[in-house]
Image: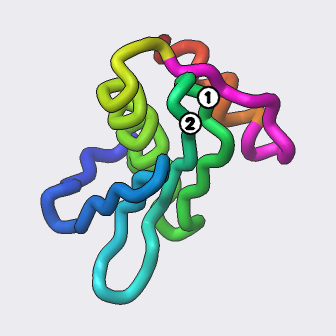
């Protein structure tokens, strides 16, 4: 995983969604609920493998103050992310 400088990007939070973006594009976002369930996570393909998904999930965990619950992945990339996050826990 590359070192990524998040300070160059804006973090928005609204209605259970964290979004990293700049003037031109969305880097990634995560949607979650008050029970700590992550309903959806997306990282722009250009910005993948830079730790953005991990950072978004850390923000969710800090916000809800407990362990997050990941929903079953709906894509092969989601399954790959879930496997890598299981190592992170």
Which residue lies at the image location 74% right of the left edge and 30% below the top edge?
71
In the displayed structure, does residue 88 sit left or right of residue 71?
A: left
- For residue 54, what is the image quadrant? top left
The answer to which of 63 and 82 lies nearer the viewer is 63
On the rendered image, what quadrant is the N terminus found in? top left
Which residue lies at the image location 30% right of the left edge and 86% below the top edge?
23
- For residue 7, what is the image quadrant? bottom left
Count neighbours of disc 1 (C-alpha within 10 A) and say few if under 14, some if 14 to 19, many if 20 or more. Answer: some
User: Can you identify the residue that label 1 sits on?
Assistant: 37
**Horizontal and vertical percent position of residue 68:** 53, 21
Q: Which labelled disc corresponds to residue 70?
A: none
Q: Which labelled disc corresponds to residue 33?
A: 2
**Magenta region, residue range:** 68-78
| Image position of 35 with respect to 60: above or below | above
Which residue lies at the image location 33% right of the left edge and 31% below the top edge?
63
Which residue lies at the image location 35% right of the left edge and 56% below the top edge?
13
**Horizontal and vertical percent position of residue 74:** 85, 43
Query: How far, Cα to Cα, is label 2 from label 1?
Result: 6 Å
Dot 1: what SS?
strand
In the displayed structure, does residue 36 sit left or right of residue 83?
A: left
Residues at discs 2 and 1 in contact (Cβ within 8 Å): yes
Q: Residue furthest left?
A: 7
């Amino acid at each position: 995983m590359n070192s990524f400088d998040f300070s160059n990007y804006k973090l928005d939070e609204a209605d259970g969604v964290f979004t990293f973006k700049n003037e031109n594009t969305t880097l990634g976002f995560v949607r979650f609920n008050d029970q700590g369930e992550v309903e959806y996570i997306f990282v722009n393909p250009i910005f993948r493998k830079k730790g953005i998904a991990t950072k978004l999930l850390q923000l969710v965990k800090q916000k809800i103050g407990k362990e997050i619950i990941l929903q079953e992945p709906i894509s092969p990339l989601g399954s790959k992310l879930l496997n890598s996050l299981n190592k992170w826990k």
